[in-house]
Image: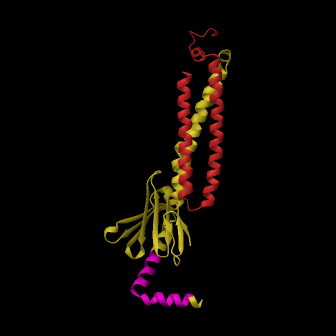
Chain colours: A yellow, B red
Amino acid sequence: MKQFKHFTANSNEKIYMIVHRHWFNIFRQYIPIILLLTFTTIVIIILLVLTTNEESAINNSSFNNSILYLIGIAVYLIAWIYGFFIWVDYHLDIWIVTSSRIVNIEQKGFFSRTVSELDYSHIQDVTSDIEGILHTALNYGDVNIQTAGTHGHFIFRNIPKPEKMKTLVMHLHRQALTKKTHPTYTQKEKEIQKND
Amino acid sequence: MLIIASALYFLFVIFVILSSAIVVWHLFKYSMDKKLAKITIVVFLIITFILLTTSLFIFFDVAKSFKKNPNQIEYYNQDTNPYSL
């Protein structure tokens, strides 16, 4: 039985898919960090070249260089920790598709976490949405699940292969409906599984 | 000057240690792939430790040379620099 914080699979529950956001979504968040690090490195190199000329060599260039290194390393350290924050946020944001439900575990910052579950029998319709050149090229997008009554929307954001996910959810939804309308079918299914 | 710089650096070190502790604790507690989480935490802690100790050595180096000659920063000003060409 698969078990971790916020999710415990039942004994007869089968996990079909565990989905994270698409890698390009996290890469986009890294772009400002990469730019900041490149900028810092270039500035430090330029200042080092400027402070190692003859005039400043007479002065205290090693002292100035040490301050530059200190500022540079502080920027690297903050960028490294922030980069790791982004990765942890990505790693802890998951959607789990099982044979009986969909679980959405969403990390919002470090001290806020939303866990929601959706039963297949509540699903009304499923839409996959791929918008834009990059989304089309890299095949990632949203899957919007419209649910009955007060349940509202259930959205898989920026997931890879949204069409495949839509097909799987629809298939599991149909299966759940069949079991609901023909309860004996479940019994027969169990008997078949036992015989196998 | 040195006291203010030391206090700021001390706050920075505290910030780094606290944020690292929070992120590591979070990842370890909530990750569903414990093996991957452990590997990532080890890599993260090693690199953070290397960066932090490097910054510590550089800070001590700066503090030491500043203690020897507290007027160094003023040498930036060409008018007051006795060695200025």
Name the residue: 57% across, 36% down. B13
Where does the image place residue B6, in percent across and percent down from the top left? 56, 28
Give the residue at the far left of this rendering: A149
Q: Is residue B43 above or below residue A130?
A: above
Quarter placement of the N terminus of chain A: bottom right
Magenta region includes residue A168: no
Please indicate, yes or no, whether residue A162 appears anywhere in the rendered image: yes
Where does the image place residue A101, in percent across and percent down from the top left? 45, 72
Q: Is residue B65 above or below residue B13?
A: above
In the depicted view, which residue is nearer to us: A116 or B85? A116
Name the residue: 62% across, 24% down. B63
Quarter placement of the C terminus of chain A: bottom right
Quadrant of the image occupied by residue A37: top right
- Our reading of the magenta stretch's main secondary structure is helix
Where does the image place residue A54, in percent across and percent down from the top left? 68, 16
Where does the image place residue A48, in percent across and percent down from the top left? 64, 26
Name the residue: 63% across, 39% down. B51
In the depicted view, which residue is nearer to us: A186 or A173? A186
Please indicate, yes or no, whether residue A27 appears anywhere in the rendered image: no
> How many discs appear?
0
Name the residue: 60% across, 10% down. B81
Magenta region includes residue A180: yes
In the depicted view, which residue is nearer to us: A177 or B55? B55
Magenta segment? A170-193
Q: Is residue A185 above or below residue B84?
A: below
Q: Is residue A183 above or below residue A117?
A: below
